[in-house]
Structures are given as C-alpha cells and as structure tokens.
C-alpha cells in the first residue's frame, strides 16, 4: 500500500516509489535478480597456416602441413571440425605442377593436418591455398621444390646431316634428369658419347667425355671421320640410363676436277668426268664410292654404277 502525501515533494516521492515497485515486479516475473545479462557472439572463423612451409624434393612427401581455424585474434577455435581443402595457388610454382595426396581434411580441435602430400615437378616460389566452405581462404608463404637424385639421360638435340671430319651439326646435346623428368642441375656424372651404325670403320673424334653444366652436356666438337648412313651417337654415364640420338647421315665433300663440254643426245660426250672426294681440309679421300645423276630437262646420265675414287682421290 502506498501512502500519499500532500505537496509537490510528496507527489514526487509517490511517483518514484510506484516506479520502483513496478520495476521490481517485472524483474521478479522474469526470474531475474535485477542484474543485466549479455551473450557473447560466435567468433567469425578464419583460416591460417600454422608455420612457414619448408622446401621440398620432387616426388618425396612434403613436411606435414597444418591449417588452423582461428578467430579474429588468431586464437584457435578448438570446437571447429570444419573441412579444409588445400591446393597449389594458381600462377605459382612450376607450370603444370599438381599436388597429390589427400587434399581435404576435417579440422580436429580446430587444426587440419595434411601429411603425405607430394609435388613431382620441380620449381620455385610455390604457394598453397587453403579453403573451407564460407570461411575466408588463406595463402601460405612461398617454398621451392628441388629435383630428386639424377636417374637418366635425355636427348635434347640430335645431330642432322653432317660433314665427315667436321663437328656434328647441330651439336649432340643431352641433359641429366631425375626419375620425374626434372633437370638435375647439380649433377656431376661424367657423360660419354659413343658411335653406332653408319660405316663400320668410322671413328668418332673430338671431346667425347664431359661433365654436365647445370644438368646440360653439349658435345660441340665431336666428329665422325667417314661418310655413312643411319649413324647413331649414344650418351652414357655411370648409374644413369643411356640416351641414343636419332639416326643421321654423314657425307663427304665432292668437287668436279674438270669442265664439261656440250654433247649430242645419245652419244658419248667425249669428256672424261673427274670427281674428287675431299676431307674437310681438302685432302683427297681414296676408295670412296661416288654416284652421279643428271639434272635439268629430264635428262638421264648413263655411267657405270658407283665407281670408286682412285688412290689419288
């Protein structure tokens, strides 16, 4: 019961007392004790890589990678079991490189762990991107993938039609690779080139054994001393698989010794045709088979087949 008092001050006291009673009734009805109650909002999750990623070796498992689900302060949300997917960041690393292994993992206590992942293509400045549904993605720092141990030789350039005694052209070039086709830039295996096919009596000359430079060996002064068809050169090195070139031909230099004069069709020309076979420095070559054909006007030149050069070439 409220006691009403007369006067301005008494009226104010009456109103204040009524307001306090009303407030107390409302609080009691709600089961409260009069204290203010607030609820913390759910943290907005983000993704973050746990640590910088170390360099890896082509074909070998990368060091285990961890991606955390964190709040805005960087603290792990330990209740999160969000699925996290990892991939090579577009435009980084080696062109065409792929990440293999289990690429999606559920977070455990807020952390997704990826082990057993591999990249077989060597390259620099790889990055990884982690994604998870509506959670903002995260990108790692850069890391490199280096080549594995040297495993084989591969031909880069095979010789084409070459002249006897002169350096093969183009030069025979091979590279040292690992088992995944990456160039082994730190290989030190000496590489030797040998000869097969062509003339059985042919000899290979020049510098036939070289060490690789940044994984490349160029045999730029290798020669073959005799003409012949379907020659092959093969590169070999201890502990590495061999690399044979494509087939190529080697020819000698020929020159007409005398001038030819006009003649009548069907009649002997009366000319003795002299052709000299020469090595690259102009020395006549003996016992070399020579054939000759006519060109122009559909003419046919008749001569005893494949005469050989005489002792003077």
Image (cartoon, helix red, strand yellow):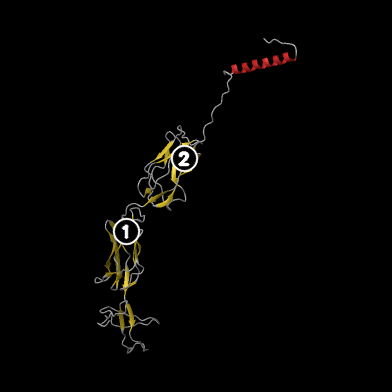
Residues 107 and 126: in front is: 126
Q: Residues within 10 Å of mark 2 (few under 14, many from 20)?
A: many
Q: Which residue is mark 2?
A: 48
**Residue contact at pointers 2 and 1, CB within 8 angstroms:** no
Q: Which residue is mark 1?
A: 153
Task: Give residue 207's position: percent from left, percent from top.
Answer: 30, 67
Task: Give residue 250's position: percent from left, percent from top.
Answer: 31, 72
Task: Give residue 143's position: percent from left, percent from top.
Answer: 42, 48
Q: Is residue 102 above or below residue 169?
A: above
Residue 223, located in which quarter of the rendered image?
A: bottom left
Query: What residue is drawn where x is 65% and y is 16%?
Result: 20
Query: What residue is drawn where x is 39% and y is 50%?
Result: 145
Q: Secondary structure at mark 1?
A: strand
Q: Is residue 82 above or below residue 259?
A: above
Q: Secondary structure at mark 2?
A: strand
| Residue furthest out toward the front | 9
Task: Give residue 276's position: percent from left, percent from top.
Answer: 30, 82
């Amino acid at each position: 019961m409220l006691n009403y008092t007369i006067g301005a001050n008494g009226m104010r006291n009456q109103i204040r007392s009524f307001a306090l009673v009303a407030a107390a009734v409302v609080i009691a009805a709600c089961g409260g004790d009069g204290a203010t109650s607030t609820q913390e909002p759910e943290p907005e999750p983000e993704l973050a890589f746990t640590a910088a990623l170390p360099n890896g070796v082509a074909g070998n498992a990368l060091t285990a990678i961890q991606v955390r689900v964190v709040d805005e302060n960087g603290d792990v949300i330990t209740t999160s079991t969000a699925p996290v997917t990892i991939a090579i960041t577009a435009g980084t690393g080696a062109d065409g490189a792929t990440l293999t292994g289990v690429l999606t993992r559920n977070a455990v206590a807020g952390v997704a762990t990826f082990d057993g992942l591999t990249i077989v293509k060597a390259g620099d400045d790889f990055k990884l991107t982690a994604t998870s549904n509506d959670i903002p993605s995260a990108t790692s720092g850069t890391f490199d993938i280096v080549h594995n141990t040297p495993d084989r030789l591969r031909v880069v350039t095979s010789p084409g039609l070459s002249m006897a005694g002169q350096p093969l052209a183009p030069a025979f070039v091979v590279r040292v690779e690992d088992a995944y086709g990456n160039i082994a830039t730190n290989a030190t295996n000496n590489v030797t080139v040998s000869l097969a096919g062509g003339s059985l009596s042919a000899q290979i000359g020049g510098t036939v054994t070289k060490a690789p430079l940044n994984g490349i060996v160029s045999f730029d002064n290798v020669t073959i001393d005799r003409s012949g068809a379907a020659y092959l050169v093969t590169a070999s090195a201890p502990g590495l698989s061999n690399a044979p070139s494509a087939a190529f031909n080697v020819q000698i230099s020929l020159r007409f010794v005398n001038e030819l004069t006009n003649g009548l069709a069907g009649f002997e020309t009366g000319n003795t045709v002299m052709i000299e076979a020469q090595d690259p420095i102009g020395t006549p070559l003996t016992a070399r088979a020579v054939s000759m054909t006519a060109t122009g006007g559909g003419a046919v030149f008749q001569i005893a087949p494949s005469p050989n050069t005489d002792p003077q070439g």
